[in-house]
């Protein structure tokens, strides 16, 4: 599906990258302190870094695209959710700090995530991991990895063909069911099972460092929208367990289990 973007593509890209970097800087200021960890109503952890990043991202997006609605995790947790129609609307999908558990563990595997959704599909997105200074961007012209800020190293990325010696499978560092994963993989030749935090799992597949990410557990749309945008721009795919297309803008923003992969990796779908 080809969708016209609501503004100049270069302006969107540059603005989005700048917003993500500023949000990451706000998070890193708190990362260096003895920050407090609280629990939301669903018992998931939240820190002041989640809120500080959102306080940068939301006004930044409103300035960049004043007419586009924003669905953001921390605002949604407080009941502030705009009415969006996933079949017809453009809307921003934001997870200010994906991988809060990794942030708390201080292992660096947490990210800023912003995606633009158009008619149920992610059309561009940025995933920024400030602790390791890696920024993944995906849009109409492809996907890239940007390392560094002052004199950045920019590398075009794409999914790879399935390796002859077996696939690299990524899974959650803080969530997951090993038995369910084993059953899903079946007799697929697996070279390595690699744990990773946050939406970096999708980006590893996009960059050709991994081949398959089965998510056999609950997520929300904002958890994966930006990573999906990067993966799609890199030639990869996200699909439901029955092989049907993955869509955004669902009534409760909850995701079913899904498969993210390079198209060359065969999978067995549920009937």
Image (cartoon, rainbow, N blue to C red):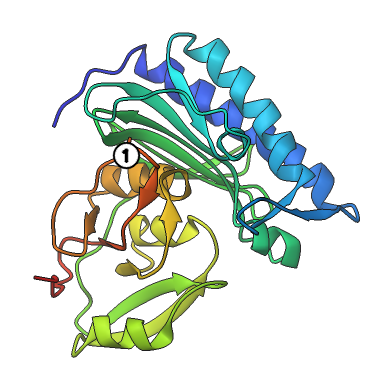
Q: Quadrant of residue 73?
A: top right
Image coordinates of residue 134 in percent, x first then y, are 57, 49
Q: Is residue 88 left or right of residue 221?
A: left
The residue singled out by tag 1 in the image is 250
Q: Examine the rendered structure and indicate whether residue 4 appears above or below residue 251.
A: above
Q: Examine the rendered structure and indicate whether residue 185 appears above or below residue 240.
A: below
Q: Is residue 135 left or right of residue 93?
A: right
Q: Residue at x 30, y 69 (%)?
A: 212
Name, please, the residue furthest toward the left. 271
Q: Quadrant of residue 229?
A: top left
Image coordinates of residue 106 in percent, x first then y, are 74, 64
Which quadrant does the N terminus fall into? Answer: top left
Q: Residue at x 32, y 69 (%)?
A: 214
Numbered disc 1: secondary structure: loop
Q: Residue at x 57, y 72 (%)?
A: 174
Out of 113 and 93, give the one closest to the viewer: 93
Q: Examine the rendered structure and indicate whether residue 31 appears above or below residue 182.
A: above
Image coordinates of residue 252 in percent, x first then y, are 39, 42
Question: Tag 1: Cα neighbours inside 10 Å, few (<14), some, or many (≥20)?
Answer: some
Q: Is residue 14 left or right of residue 240?
A: right
Q: Is residue 270 left or right of residue 6?
A: left
Q: Examine the rendered structure and indicate whether residue 18 appears above or below residue 263.
A: above
**Does residue 80 appear in the picture of this structure?**
yes
Q: Residue at x 27, y 58 (%)?
A: 159
**Does residue 155 appear in the picture of this structure?**
no
Which quadrant does the C terminus fall into? Answer: bottom left
């Amino acid at each position: 599906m080809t969708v016209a973007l609501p503004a100049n593509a270069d302006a969107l890209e540059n603005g989005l990258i700048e917003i993500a970097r500023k949000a990451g800087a706000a998070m890193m200021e708190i990362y260096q302190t003895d920050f407090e960890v609280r629990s939301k109503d669903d018992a998931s952890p939240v820190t002041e870094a989640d809120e500080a990043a959102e306080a940068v991202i939301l006004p930044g997006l409103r300035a960049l695209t004043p007419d586009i609605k924003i669905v953001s995790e921390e605002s949604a947790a407080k009941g502030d959710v705009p009415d969006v129609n996933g079949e017809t609307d453009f809307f921003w999908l934001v997870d200010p700090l994906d991988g809060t558990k990794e942030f708390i563990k201080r292992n660096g595997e947490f990210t800023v995530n912003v995606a633009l959704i158009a008619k149920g599909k992610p059309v561009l997105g940025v995933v920024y991991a400030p602790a390791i200074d890696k920024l993944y961007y995906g849009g109409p012209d492809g996907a890239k990895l940007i390392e560094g800020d002052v004199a950045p190293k920019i590398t075009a990325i794409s999914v790879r063909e399935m390796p002859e010696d077996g696939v690299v499978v990524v899974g959650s560092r803080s969530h997951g069911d090993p038995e369910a994963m084993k059953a899903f993989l079946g007799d697929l030749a697996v070279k390595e099972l690699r744990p990773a935090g946050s939406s970096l799992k999708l980006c590893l597949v996009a960059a050709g460092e991994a081949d398959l990410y089965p998510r056999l557990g609950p997520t929300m749309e904002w958890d994966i929208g930006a990573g999906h945008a990067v993966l799609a721009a890199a030639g990869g795919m996200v699909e439901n367990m029955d092989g049907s297309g993955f869509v955004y803008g669902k009534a409760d923003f909850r995701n079913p289990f899904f498969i993210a992969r390079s198209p060359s990796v065969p999978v067995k779908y549920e009937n």
